[in-house]
Amino acid sequence: MKRSYVIKPELEKIYPVISHGKGIYLFDQEGKRYIDGCSGAVTVSIGHAVDEVVEAMYAQAKEVSFAYRSHFSSEAVEELGAKLAEWAPGSLNWTFFVSSGSEATETAQKIAIQYWQERGKPTKNRIISRWMSYHGITMGALSMSGHVLRRKRFVPLLEDYPTISAPYPYRKPDGVSLEDYALQCANELETAILRVGPEQVAAFIAEPVIGASGGAVVPPDGYFQRIREICDKYEVLFIADEVMTGIGRTGKAFGIDHWGVVPDMITLGKGMSSGYTPMAATVVSDEIIETIKNGSGLIMAGHTYSANPQSAAVSLAVLKYVEKHSLFEKAAEQGAYLLERLQELAAELPLIGDARGLGMLCGLEFVKDKDTKEPFPLSHNVSGRVIAKAFEKGLLVYPAVGGLEGIAGDSVIIAPPLTITKAEIDELIGLLKGAVESVQQELRQ
Ligand code: PLP
């Protein structure tokens, strides 16, 4: 293997060099095959090397790749915006394009603050978010993230936006019904707003299904409905961070659609372009856009690559593929099968405390004691060990450790492309079982 001069997060680690991919599979230069059991970073929703997308990429590049958003619009970007408006709930008809999920959530944060300024309420500039959440790695996005491990080094520079806990059904208090638990958790938002003062709070941000900091934690019914009521009562905007859950991942267009709730903004990334190009977006309601249009008329959030025709054409081709192959429905159907198989594993293997998920976004939580649900100390790096064993066996799974020591177990995300077949899921489960069994064995020694 050649020495790498590229900075990687783990400086000492030698990474295999990727060669190519097809469907749910990736191949490295040594010829080893991997099942992409987590779509990279829960990104490659339509699978690797899809011809239609490659053709759209080439066709756009032959015409023009870059035209600056302040000079031109493009057919691709207009059509992409229209498709998102068609899919988005309520009057979320406007899209601001960016290149990463972090930019999308940070843009939502800025638009929320600007919205209240335009309405003559400049003190409404705080965001409330939840512990056990991840909204991105840039400073503004990290300020909103309740991901302890990722915040840690930067805490003095961050805003303390994570204030309330997220519902965590696996670890709900005994003797409380799920229904009551949903309300209790949602009502924490009301308490937090009243403590800070509604005149200070611009928005509340949450992932419909918790991803990187918890491992596909699905909230109980009633939670987001109550969140919406509280936001309306105190004039707080609700931002649904759908960077991981959006564009069919959970079996509906958007994760929040499972509860029939209409947010004021939705952030997108990852599956929006299936990783074929960096592309992300902040989708915004008519009300917010009208207010800004009638005020300053300018959104102060542009990036060089915002709405570039090349990325728009690629993302549009991905969305057309999703539609043509009914991938929302497929994700729901095959995701139910994936979850069933993961729950079988959980019943069999003592290391797995919980198998959960929605659509094609599933997670496993590892625990020391299945009966008491006692987590391992994070220093045991259980999920890291499972990920390494799975990698050895040719399966990619994604870490989901938010760093809430003693409160949550280590988790991993299993989220293959939405196109995966039942036979391929069986193959994935076989490799995963082998990896978990190996780690179980190591921990017993
Ligand atoms: N929001 C959520 C819910 C995410 O899962 C992520 C990435 O994992 C982000 C935001 C940040 O996206 P990006 O890594 O593209 O900046």
Image: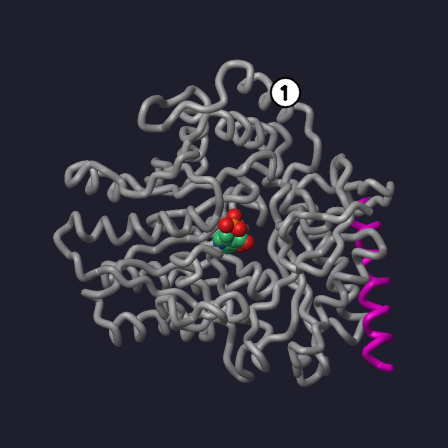
| The quadrant where residue 74 appears | top left
Residue stretch rendered in magenta on the structure? 424-445
Tag 1's secondary structure? helix
Q: The residue under label 1 is which amino acid type?
A: Glu
Q: Position of residue 290 (x, y in %)?
A: 21, 38
Residue at position x 47%, y 40% in the image: 99
Say whether residue 39 is left or right of residue 85.
right
Asked whether 79 or 98 is in front, the reply is 98
Q: Residue furthest left?
A: 120
Q: Look at mark 1 in the image and give the residue it sits on.
A: 55
Q: How many marks?
A: 1
Q: Position of residue 232 (x, y in %)?
A: 27, 58
Asked whether 383 or 260 is in front, the reply is 383
Asked whether 428 or 155 is in front, the reply is 155
Q: Position of residue 190 (x, y in %)?
A: 31, 71
Q: Residues within 10 Å of mark 1 (few under 14, many from 20)?
A: few
Residue 5 in view (yes/no): yes
The C terminus: image quadrant:
bottom right
In the depicted structure, whether residue 238 falls above or below residue 444: above
Q: Position of residue 360 (x, y in %)?
A: 64, 50
In the depicted structure, whether residue 368 falls above or below residue 299: below
Q: How is the image coloured?
A: one colour
